[in-house]
């Protein structure tokens, strides 16, 4: 579909400036010009597929406008549909119409022919509409299958980095958390508000609650205007609580002794 790209400008789907910005983004990320134009907000997903349909002669369908027969769905397995982003739409005589993200993918068409014994007529459908339709007709993808075999015991959890063993004192202090290396993890906001839940009896680490997952080994910087000192630490474990908050353990790697003493005094008063 490389020859089609120039028509984006000629047919005024995008301006020459927008196309140029899309090309730059495409070269930077290694993604297609179409994905880049969508990311930059110059085209919508549906517009891209309409453009491709107009210029290839392959029909574009709105899957929400069709009700697919169970007998047609039975012709292609759920696994094949999910793996190849396709969905059988209707069967007319010996021709099976199949909605696809990439109707020019000969390999998928050949596989469908071999599976069904029918002539395959591919049509365009957007990625988002295919995902929604596949979930609608087959049910949501089962990501829980391997989890139903049994529950995880505390003994098994001990080998994970988020398991907590040290003696702790309750502690409630608010901090603003910044990421130490933004090349590793970059938050959408400048800092994250967190509240401590406890501190180890030795003052070496604290437990904190926040709204985001913090991966172990991530270096962080903690700020508290009352303490007046910047504290550096490393995330050693993190897990999601039922409330929706994340509980994380942060080990201090750079903290003044006076700050540790203040935190421990506060903890012992509660």
Image (spheres, grey):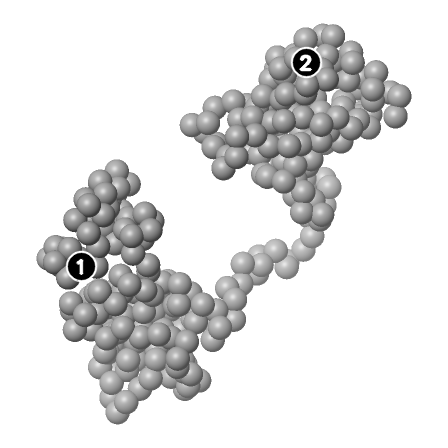
- Quadrant of the image containing the C terminus: top right
Image quadrant in which you'd find residue 173: top right
Per the model, the C-alpha gap separating discs 1 and 2 is 58 Å
Residue 147: give its label: none
| In the image, farthest residue toward the bottom | 93
Residue at the disc numbered 2: 228
Q: Is residue 81 above or below residue 258?
A: below
Seen from the viewer's position, the closer of residues 213 and 111 is 213
Seen from the viewer's position, the closer of residues 110 and 197 is 197
Seen from the viewer's position, the closer of residues 68 and 226 is 226
- Quadrant of the image containing the N terminus: bottom left
Residue at the image position 32 percent from the left and 64 percent from the top: 46
Residue at the image position 76 percent from the left and 31 percent from the top: 197
Q: What is the total number of numbered labels drawn onto the structure image?
A: 2
Residue at the image position 28 percent from the left and 80 percent from the top: 97
Q: Is residue 75 above or below residue 194?
A: below
Q: Closer to the observer: label 1 or label 2?
A: 1
Image quadrant in which you'd find residue 72: bottom left
Residue 90 place in picture, x, y as percent: 33, 84
Residue 240 place in picture, x, y as percent: 65, 43
Residue at the image position 31 percent from the left and 75 percent from the top: 61
Residue at the disc numbered 1: 12
């Amino acid at each position: 579909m490389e020859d089609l790209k120039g028509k984006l400008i000629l047919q005024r789907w995008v301006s020459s400036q927008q196309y140029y910005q899309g090309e730059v983004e495409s070269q930077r990320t290694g993604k297609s010009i179409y994905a880049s134009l969508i990311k930059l907000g110059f085209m919508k997903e549906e517009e891209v597929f309409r453009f491709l349909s107009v210029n290839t002669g392959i029909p574009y369908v709105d899957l929400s406008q069709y009700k697919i027969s169970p007998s047609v769905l039975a012709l292609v397995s759920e696994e094949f549909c999910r793996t190849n982003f396709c969905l059988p739409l209707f069967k007319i005589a010996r021709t099976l119409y199949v909605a696809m993200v990439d109707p020019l993918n000969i390999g998928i068409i050949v596989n469908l022919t071999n599976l069904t014994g029918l002539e395959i007529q591919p049509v365009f459908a957007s990625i988002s509409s295919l995902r929604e339709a596949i979930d609608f007709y087959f049910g949501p993808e089962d990501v829980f299958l391997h989890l139903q075999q049994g529950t995880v015991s505390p003994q098994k959890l001990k080998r994970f980095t988020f398991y907590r063993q040290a003696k702790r004192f309750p502690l409630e202090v608010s901090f603003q958390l910044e990421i130490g290396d933004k090349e590793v993890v970059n938050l959408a906001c400048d800092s994250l508000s967190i509240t401590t839940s406890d501190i180890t009896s030795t003052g070496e680490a604290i437990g904190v609650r926040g709204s985001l997952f913090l991966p172990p080994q991530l270096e962080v910087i903690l700020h508290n205007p009352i303490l007046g000192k910047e504290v550096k630490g490393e995330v050693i474990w993190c897990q999601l609580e039922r409330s929706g908050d994340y509980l994380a353990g942060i080990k201090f790697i750079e903290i003044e002794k006076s700050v540790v003493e203040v935190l421990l005094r506060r903890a012992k008063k509660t």
